[in-house]
Image (cartoon, helix red, strand yellow):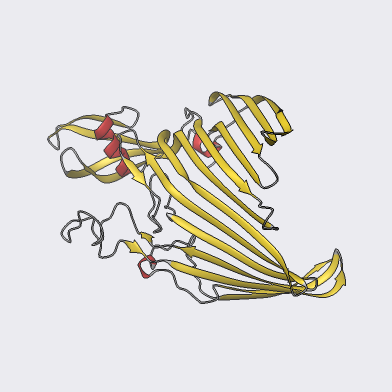
Amino acid sequence: SNVLPATTQRVTEGYAEVNIPLFKNTSFGQSLEVDGAIRRTHYSMSGNATTWKVGAVYELNDDYMLRVTRSRDIRAPSPQELNPNTRLANSTLADPKYGIQYVMPSTAGGNPNLELEKGNTFTVGAVFKPSWLPRFRLSVDYYDIKVSGAIDILTSTLAVNLCRATNNPSICTTGPDAALGIPDRILSLSTIYRNVNELNARGFELVSTYSLPVAGGDLNFTLNGNYVDTLKTSLPDGSRQEFSGVTGNSGSVTTIFGVPKWRADGVVTFARPTWSITTQYRYIPRGILNRNWKGPQDEGYSPYLPDTVSNNRIGSRFYMNLNGKVKLLGDGDRKVELFGGINNLFDRSPPPNLRYTGNGLYFDPIGRTYRIGVRADW
């Protein structure tokens, strides 16, 4: 039977939150508020957790505001991750201890003994609404997120490397093999879900808006920017993998494909009572195809090494979308509109070295597309 056994986890929790206004309309500023929250949670399979958050918002005046938060967070394993069902498969893998390949049985599946993922988040930011520039707003935030015990399923290759690096009995079983003449062979591997990773994400986010009346309508500008200082994972054997600046679709043990080092998105809209037109802009800068490969641009490159490629860079791309709508009849909440749009207006293709793997998260794999329709609210 392929029916999976039911996995039940009972959750019991209590929660409290408080907000304290420290001052309002003083010589120190317009206001200062501190808020805190705490939650105690019991998971019948995954244990107990205390999570909390402390934050403050300081308004110097109507123009400037500062905010800061610090929190402890958790993620409970999903039913799929906790499911005790496993499956056995045989794979021919390379043993780094001897530099030879042989068949290793591996067990894959869920793990009912998973613990909670634990995260620590720190953010600090500022909001600017200068009185000398009406209808303008800018917010800039810094974030630093660290997750320990991140749940993941090991690949067979990574399990072999961790087995030899840590000799962890929960990952592998080793012993002699007289038939092959190997005194310390890997007899079995466990590639089930486990709390194996640490994750750190750190960077800056920017959101800016501005609007002004023009020709009987409103012209609105929005700019979103993001800079990733680091997005990395750490494994029990001490190895680290950095994913910032990687825009190729290079999968990893954490299923993170990589993110651009920075990117920018913009929206410009001109709206009048009966019609509007919107343009959207998106830019992805030049990036790395795969952190595990080396190209002529990378240190240590040699055409004779097995991990080298002719080009380990992904080109930049600029995309523009165009959308519009026109009111045909009606007024207020009752109206009929004609709408349409063109995605990827300049018909930009993905970088050529993504021809086989693709990366639809950042690059458009389709090309220019059109849509038109009628929307009725009545």
Residue 104 horizontal/vertical position (percent): 27, 40
Using residue 310 as the reference point, say whether residue 288 is left or right of it.
Answer: right
The residue lying at 45 percent from left, 49 percent from top is: 228
Along the viewing direction, whichever of 215 and 295 lies nearer the viewer: 215
Q: Which of the 4 quarters of the picture holds residue 51?
A: top right
Which residue is at the front of the view, 219 or 64? 64
Q: Is residue 289 above or below residue 241?
A: below
Q: In the rendered view, tell whether residue 162 sits above or below residue 256.
A: above
Can you see residue 83? no
Image check: 340 left or right of 172? right
Position in image of residue 368 (x %, y %): 54, 76
**What is the number of callouts on the image?**
0
Judge by depth and name the residue closer to the eye, 39 or 212: 212
Q: Quadrant of residue 26?
A: top right
Nearest to the observer: residue 322 or residue 157: 322
Q: Residue at x 48, y 33 (%)?
A: 84
